[in-house]
Image (spheres, grey):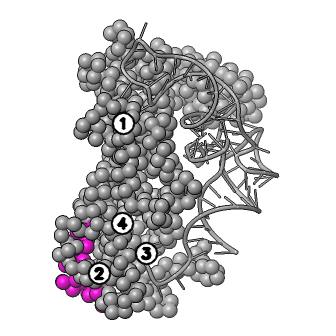
RNA sequence: GGGCGUGUAGCAUAGCCUGGAUAAUGCACUGGCCUCCUAAGCCAGGGACCGCGGGUUCGAAUCCUGCCGCGCCCGCCA
């Protein structure tokens, strides 16, 4: 309805000025109506004009309403109530707006001035299991990448995998103990948690092993060829495993996006040099640190530093993140840096960004955004764990989603069989997991509940997918092809058609609103409204029974609804089966 | 102790940026609707002192402030 606002304001200007209301004093009062019941699309509260006009708000609203009525002829009908001027889009205006979307594959979404944006997301660890924590980063990051690309930006996906650092000493030694041919073979590592835990345990209990591990770390860092080769074996096994999960999840990440910590190791000394050059580095107990001052104090009230190089000469993650910033801004030419990482790291990123800014690694033209997200909780409000109290393996969770979706299909639609059913089960199961994650405000913790996300009712992926499937079913019965509707005229005769038309017009605004704050849930909310309006329309407006004009109009509405859903869900990384 | 975040029907959430009319949605609950395009649906109904108290305003879930509850973070892990 932002179109209605922008079209109405210029037409309202003359009549309103002729009432003695000054230019610039009323325009921003015009906005979307907040009252429900379809009373109005756009409203203008007149209460703030009251002291200036020395009249009651309702009198002013009455005056404005009758003054602007003529100039909005054909666009909106005007009324007033309780001191509000209310504009309701006319059927003519709605129809013509909707008609302009019939042949538009973008459903009205415009391109933005293109920026180069690095999106850092997923970031699993080599030789470790992927768990639900990676799920959120991967799913949210992927949705954001898709939306940004759709808006015309150049997006550089960065999968900042944990592939470097002290744990690799013990991991490599453990690999050798097991026998590299054993591990590197077909079987690979079947249980990363077990592999990691075994290594850890030996490190803690076996002095000889611990000693070997330490010297292995030194060899790794000095880039000893044989050590690098062994390290690469672990990386390769893990990468294969990540790709399996990504493929199951249906995300965009590929090997080309891998940019592990190891990739930045040569920039780490440069970070130190540059911070040192601009005089930001302090020495504290042998460690190189940056004191930012301000609100950064520790428990004792002493200044709290950003650790750049440890007393033993090792670097840690702040340094690595600073190296990333240098690389992304200076080598890749990124304008914006996005980090899809959990909320607990908020302070870390604030401090890193502040250091980067102070040191001139980034300037005013760059935006650094921590796209934070909350934890995954179980229905008891605790961090999600398996029955044994361990982190839930992501693959197990995804497999269970598919199994559950499959059993729903067998219950609700037993006619669907074979590979089509298998595909649908995947789309529904994975879609449900992704949508439940994306559909609520990412910054808050979210509760993982199988029954809710797969319930096929409410604000869930299956509900939206179901709407889409119903529309596909209508088309397959109609004998009309989806792309033959370009000349359709939209005829709005029922409240349900009008409501659906309004929702369809809201698509581009929803996408923009969603991308503006990097909040996928805003798009979800819209898609649910579309779907819900469609369901009401579907009950009342029989599509295939009307005369040709009505049928053509309703088919076009169906097509646009289906496209909104598949395009919208597609931007979230969720697929839409044609039958389910 | 300091910093950051959060609190909306029984449950789960949207709305808060940018203040407006009767606080929106889903689940669950109650009652209706399949000779008709997928009832995995639709329609109707009940259910909320928007954590508590102040303040700003013609008007506060929304902005400011103080409390309370919960969560996270606070130097050599990432």
Residue occupied by mark 3: A318
Numbered-mark total: 4
Callouts 2 and 4 in the same chain: yes
Closer mark to the observer between disc 2 and disc 1: 1
The chain letter for the residue carrying disc 4 is A
What SS does tag 1 mark?
helix
Whether residues under marks 2 and 4 lie with C-beta atoms below 8 angstroms apart, the answer is no
Residue occupied by mark 1: A409
The chain letter for the residue carrying disc 1 is A
Q: Is residue A16 left or right of residue A468?
A: right
Is residue A299 shown above or below A57?
A: below
* Circle 2 residues within 10 Å: few <14, some 14–19, many ≥20: many
- What number is the disc on residue A174? 2
Callouts 2 and 1 in the same chain: yes
Mark sitting earlier along the chain (3/4): 4
What SS does tag 3 mark?
helix
- What number is the disc on residue A129? 4
């Amino acid at each position: 309805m932002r179109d209605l606002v922008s079209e109405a304001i210029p037409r309202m200007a003359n009549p309103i000025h002729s009432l003695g209301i000054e230019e610039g004093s009323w325009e921003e009062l015009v906005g979307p109506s907040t009252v429900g019941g379809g009373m109005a699309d756009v409203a203008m509260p007149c209460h703030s004009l009251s002291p200036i006009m020395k009249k009651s708000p309702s009198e002013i609203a009455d005056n404005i309403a009758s003054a602007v009525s003529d100039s909005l002829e054909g666009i909106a009908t005007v009324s007033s109530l309780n001191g509000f001027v209310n504009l309701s889009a006319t059927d003519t205006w709605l129809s013509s707006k909707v008609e302009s979307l019939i042949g538009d594959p973008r459903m009205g979404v415009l391109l933005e001035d293109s920026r180069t944006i690095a999106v850092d997301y997923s970031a699993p660890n080599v030789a470790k299991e992927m768990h639900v924590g990676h799920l959120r980063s991967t799913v949210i990051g992927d949705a954001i990448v898709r939306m940004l690309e759709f808006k015309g930006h150049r997006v550089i996906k960065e999968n900042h995998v944990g592939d470097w650092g002290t744990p690799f000493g013990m991991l490599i030694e453990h690999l050798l103990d097991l026998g590299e041919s054993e591990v590197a073979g077909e079987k690979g590592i079947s249980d990363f948690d077990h592999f990691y835990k075994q290594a850890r345990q030996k490190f803690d209990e076996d002095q000889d092993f611990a000693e070997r591990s330490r010297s292995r770390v030194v060899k790794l860092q000095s880039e000893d060829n044989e050590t690098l080769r062994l390290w690469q074996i672990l990386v390769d096994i893990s990468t294969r495993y990540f790709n399996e999960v990504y493929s199951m999840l249906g995300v965009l990440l590929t090997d080309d996006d891998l940019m592990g910590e190891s990739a930045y190791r040569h920039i780490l000394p440069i970070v130190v040099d540059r911070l040192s050059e601009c005089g930001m580095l302090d020495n504290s107990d042998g460690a190189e640190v940056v004191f930012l001052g301000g609100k950064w104090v520790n428990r004792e009230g002493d200044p709290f530093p950003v650790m750049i190089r440890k007393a033993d000469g090792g670097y840690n993650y702040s340094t690595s993140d600073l190296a990333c910033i240098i690389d992304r801004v200076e080598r890749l030419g990124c304008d914006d840096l996005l980090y899809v990482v959990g909320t607990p790291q908020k302070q870390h990123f604030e401090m890193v960004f502040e250091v980067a800014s102070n040191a001139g690694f980034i300037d005013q033209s760059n935006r650094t955004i921590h796209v934070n997200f909350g934890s995954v909780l179980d229905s008891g409000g605790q961090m999600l764990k398996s029955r044994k109290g361990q982190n839930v393996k992501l693959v197990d969770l995804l497999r269970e989603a598919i199994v559950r979706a499959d059993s729903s299909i067998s219950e609700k639609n037993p006619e669907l069989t074979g590979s089509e059913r298998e595909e649908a089960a995947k789309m529904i199961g994975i879609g449900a997991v992704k949508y439940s994650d994306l559909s609520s405000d990412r910054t808050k913790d979210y509760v993982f509940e199988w029954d809710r996300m797969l319930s096929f009712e409410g604000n869930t992926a299956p509900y939206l997918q179901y709407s889409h499937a119903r529309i596909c079913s209508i088309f397959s019965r109609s004998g009309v092809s989806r792309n033959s509707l370009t000349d359709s005229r939209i005829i709005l005769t029922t409240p349900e058609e009008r409501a659906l038309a309004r929702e369809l017009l809201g698509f581009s605004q929803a996408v923009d609103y969603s991308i503006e704050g990097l909040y996928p849930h805003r798009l979800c909310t819209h898609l649910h409204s579309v779907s819900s309006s469609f369901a009401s329309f579907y009950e009342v407006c029989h599509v295939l029974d009307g005369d040709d004009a009505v049928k053509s109009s309703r088919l076009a509405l169906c097509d646009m609804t289906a496209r909104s859903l598949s395009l919208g869900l597609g931007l979230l990384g969720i697929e839409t089966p044609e039958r389910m």
